[in-house]
Structure formats: structure tokens, C-alpha cells
């Protein structure tokens, strides 16, 4: 099903599929094994304009919406989730600037990010502030024309590899989330360093590091929006990006399903190809149902968001939860169809299963997403009553 994509969107999908097949599939096992950041693949994405697909033309982008970036993410994820998240994390890092930045900040940073010459990252999470995002402790204190930042961000995707960081700090502790403020920081600023590269279960091609700020002085012009708006800007950035986690999920699910079908057509047991067994057919059918339902959901939601509605938190959460839960199930079942071979690292399905797990955790756990959805349901019901 082609989901009535425009010619331009189909061209994007075709281009990314080619990059994925030619540049990602041949190296994905090696990138995973050696935990190597996919710099060359990011360069190929940059050279073909893919970092700009969902950024406005006024800032050097191609003017598309999140439907376009989701297409990129889906196709890259079909080959390797570690690669696709490296791409997607740069967009997430751009969103706070796009959503809340001054015109000057947008002009300074977005064209560099749209060209892919420089990568971005988003710094919100801390050791003691994951789901409870308003509990962050990294502090920014005004000092003349500068803010002085102290604290540590944890598990930051693209940490150390990106050049531009949208970081959420606290400027007024007594106000909690209402005292949070975002800043753009650049790699190389004095007092800004990185922790060691984390060793992960999956998405091992991606880089995950701490961001460490020790009296890091940032010019006041690098503030994103105004003091006190950081939490809401972060929430809006996540709302915008969560369907892209859905896109990652449909990509990895489709990749696993394709491999499972191909394997089941080849593998013989009891004198027959295993695809002739109804038990296997039903597993494949259930996988296909999940993948297609997730895809229909994700692109319905991205199209809606691309019409610039006011509030889409609930839909965005739904477009993250369903596909990511589905991806976990689909990749586990794909491995099951491969049997003992699936458990071996020579075959790509065990990597897909390891990779898929993070989709239920990052950018807001699926439990937190269910809270968001339920709270919206309660609000909607209350407003209908009035
Ligand atoms: N868009 C706009 N505003 C939002 C918002 C959203 N999606 N979500 C919350 N807000 C606003 C609220 O309206 C509230 O505003 P007021 O102070 O004017 O009332 C303010 O932000 C605080 O909201 P709330 O009280 O709901 O905040 P909580 O501290 O209870 O946290 C959750 C809410 C749990 C939803 C939030 O902390 C969250 O999303 N956690 C997950 C974080 C995450 O995704 N981490 C991954 C990091 S990147 S890998």
C-alpha cells in the first residue's frame, strides 16, 4: 500500500531505500559489533539533503513536514536502527530551536543542521530525571551577558558526535518545570565536555554519552525562547518527534518481517519449506497485521501534525506506543521463525530484537505515554461534560 504519498515523498523513500541497501546493510553488523558511529552514512544523508527534509525552506530546509522525516527514518530503520536514530536525534536537537528559538538563533543554527554539515543532539535526561523530566538539576545562572551552566546530562544520543546541543536547564529551581530554560551549546565551548561512550544492549552504532558542564559560559543570545519556557519547549519538541519513534518501529519491524518471510521460504524441515506450515504462516500474518496497522497509524498522525494543529500530545503518544510495542513483538517473532539460527549473531534478526527494545523506553517510556493518553482522555471527557 502506498498511503497516497506525493511524488516527492516517494522520491525521498526511494532515495533512502537505496542508501540503506547500498551503504547501511553491508556494514550494519560491523557497526553494531564495533559500536562505531556511522559517520560516512550521516555524510551520505547530508550530501543528498535528507537532514533538511522537514525543516522550513527559510532556514535551508526542503520545507516538508514530519511525514517526510518519518519516511527517511522508516527506511533507514529497516536496515539499522542504530543508524536511523543517529539521523533522528539530530532532528530532535533542531526542534527546540525551531519551536522556541529567536529568529537570530534559527538563522544561525538551522541552516547548518538542514545541510547536515553539523549534527545536533537534545539534552534533557539526567541521572535522576528520566520520566520525571521536570526534576532536572543542571543549573544555568545569569552572569552579565552570559549564563553559567553546571550539571550533567545523561544518555544523550549523538553525545560527542554532534556539534550543536539543545540543552534544558533550570534557571529558577523553586519553580520546578516552570523554572526550566533551554540553551544552544556548541561542542568545544569551554567547560563543556563528554562522558565515556555508553555500552548498550542495542542501537550500538549510535553514540550515547553524558554531557558535562563545569562553569560553562554561554552567551545570553543562545537562550531558546525566554527563561522559564524550557520545559514546555522540550515537551513540544518531544511531541513533534515521537511519531518518528513510531517510524523507527515500523522500519525495524518491516526489516524483520522481510527477513523472516525470506528465511521461511528457504528453510526446510520435515521435508517441507517451513513457510508451508500453518503455525509459521499465522505468525507471519500476525507480524504483517502489526506492521501495517502501525504504518497506517504513524502516517495518519504525521499528516495531521503537518497541518499544524494546536495540540497533538495524545496522538503523538499513540503513534509512539503502538508501533514500538508492535516492533518488540514482531522482532521477537522474527527471531523465533529463524529458530536457533536467529539466536546467532551471524544473522541480523537478533540485532533487530536488541535494537527494538529501546523504542519502548526512549523519548518517554511507553508507561509515561499511556499516562499522557489517559490524562487527555480525562480532560476531553471533563470538557464535554461542561
Ligand atoms: N506540550 C505543551 N505543554 C506541556 C506538555 C506538552 N506536551 N506537557 C506538559 N506541558 C505543560 C503543562 O501544561 C504544564 O503547564 P502549566 O505549568 O502551565 O500548568 C507544565 O508543562 C507541566 O506539566 P505537567 O504538570 O504535566 O508536568 P509533569 O512534571 O507532571 O510531567 C510528563 C509530565 C510526565 C508528561 C513529562 O515529564 C514527560 O513527558 N516525561 C517524559 C520525558 C521524556 O520523554 N524523556 C525522554 C527524554 S528524550 S530521550
Image: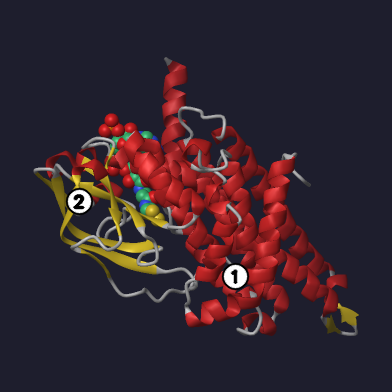
The kind of secondary structure element at disc 2 is: strand
Q: Which residue is mark 1?
A: 352
Q: Residues within 10 Å of mark 2 (few under 14, many from 20)?
A: many
Q: Is residue 321 visible?
A: no
Q: Which residue is mark 2?
A: 218
| Identity of the residue drawn at 84% across and 74% down | 265
Name the quadrant where ligand 1 sits. top left
Question: Does residue 251 appear left or right of residue 173 in this picture?
Answer: right
Q: CA distance from mark 1 to mark 2?
A: 40 Å
Residue 9 percent across, percent down from the top left: 68, 44
Residue 240 percent across, percent down from the top left: 47, 42
| Identity of the residue drawn at 79% across and 72% down | 262
Give the camera-side residue of 92 and 231. 92
Question: Does residue 380 appear left or right of residue 156 in this picture?
Answer: right
In the image, residue 119 above or below residue 262: above
Place residue 195 in its image quadrant.
bottom left
Place residue 159 in its image quadrant.
bottom left
Q: Count the marks.
A: 2
Give the camera-side residue of 27 and 260. 27
Amino acid at each position: 500500500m502506498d498511503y497516497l504519498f506525493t511524488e516527492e515523498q516517494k522520491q525521498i523513500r526511494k532515495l533512502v531505500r537505496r542508501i540503506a541497501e547500498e551503504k547501511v546493510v553491508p556494514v550494519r553488523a560491523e557497526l553494531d559489533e564495533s559500536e562505531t558511529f556511522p559517520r560516512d552514512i550521516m555524510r551520505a544523508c547530508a550530501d543528498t539533503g535528507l537532514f533538511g527534509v522537514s525543516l522550513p525552506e527559510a532556514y535551508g530546509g526542503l520545507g516538508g513536514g514530519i511525514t517526510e522525516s518519518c519516511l527517511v527514518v522508516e527506511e533507514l530503520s529497516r536496515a539499522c536502527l542504530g543508524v536511523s536514530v543517529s539521523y533522528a536525534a539530530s532532528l530532535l536537537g533542531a526542534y527546540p530551536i525551531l519551536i522556541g528559538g529567536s529568529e537570530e538563533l534559527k538563522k544561525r543554527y538551522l541552516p547548518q543542521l538542514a545541510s547536515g554539515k553539523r549534527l545536533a543532539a537534545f539534552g534533557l535526561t539526567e541521572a535522576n530525571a528520566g520520566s520525571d523530566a521536570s526534576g532536572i538539576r543542571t543549573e544555568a545562572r545569569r552572569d552579565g551577558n552570559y549564563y553559567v551552566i553546571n550539571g550533567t546530562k545523561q544518555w544523550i544520543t549523538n553525545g560527542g558526535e554532534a556539534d550543536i546541543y539543545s540543552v534544558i536547564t533550570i534557571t529558577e529551581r523553586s519553580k520546578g518545570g516552570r523554572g526550566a530554560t533551554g540553551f544552544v551549546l556548541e561542542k568545544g565551548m569551554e567547560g563543556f565536555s563528554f562522558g565515556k561512550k555508553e555500552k548498550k544492549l542495542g542501537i550500538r552504532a549510535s553514540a550515547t554519552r553524558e554531557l558535562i558542564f563545569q562553569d560553562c559560559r554561554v552567551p545570553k543570545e543562545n537562550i531558546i525562547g525566554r527563561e522559564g519556557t524550557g520545559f514546555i519547549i522540550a515537551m513540544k519538541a518531544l511531541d513533534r518527534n515521537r511519531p518518528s519513534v513510531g517510524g523507527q518501529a515500523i522500519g525495524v519491524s518491516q526489516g524483520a518481517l522481510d527477513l523472516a518471510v525470506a528465511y521461511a521460504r528457504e528453510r526446510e524441515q520435515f521435508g517441507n519449506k517451513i513457510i508451508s506450515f500453518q503455525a509459521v504462516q499465522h505468525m507471519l500474518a500476525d507480524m504483517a497485521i502489526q506492521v501495517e496497522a502501525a504504518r497506517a497509524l504513524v502516517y495518519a498522525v504525521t499528516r495531521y501534525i503537518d497541518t499544524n494543529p494546536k495540540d497533538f500530545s495524545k496522538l503523538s503518544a499513540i503513534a509512539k506506543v503502538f508501533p514500538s510495542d508492535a516492533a518488540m513483538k514482531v522482532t521477537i517473532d522474527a527471531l523465533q521463525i529463524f529458530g536457533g539460527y536467529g539466536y546467532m549473531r551471524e544473522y541480523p534478526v537478533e540485532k533487530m530484537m536488541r535494537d527494538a527494545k529501546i523504542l519502548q523506553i526512549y523519548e518517554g517510556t511507553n508507561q509515561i505515554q499511556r499516562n499522557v493518553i489517559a490524562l487527555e482522555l480525562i480532560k476531553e471527557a471533563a470538557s464535554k461534560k461542561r
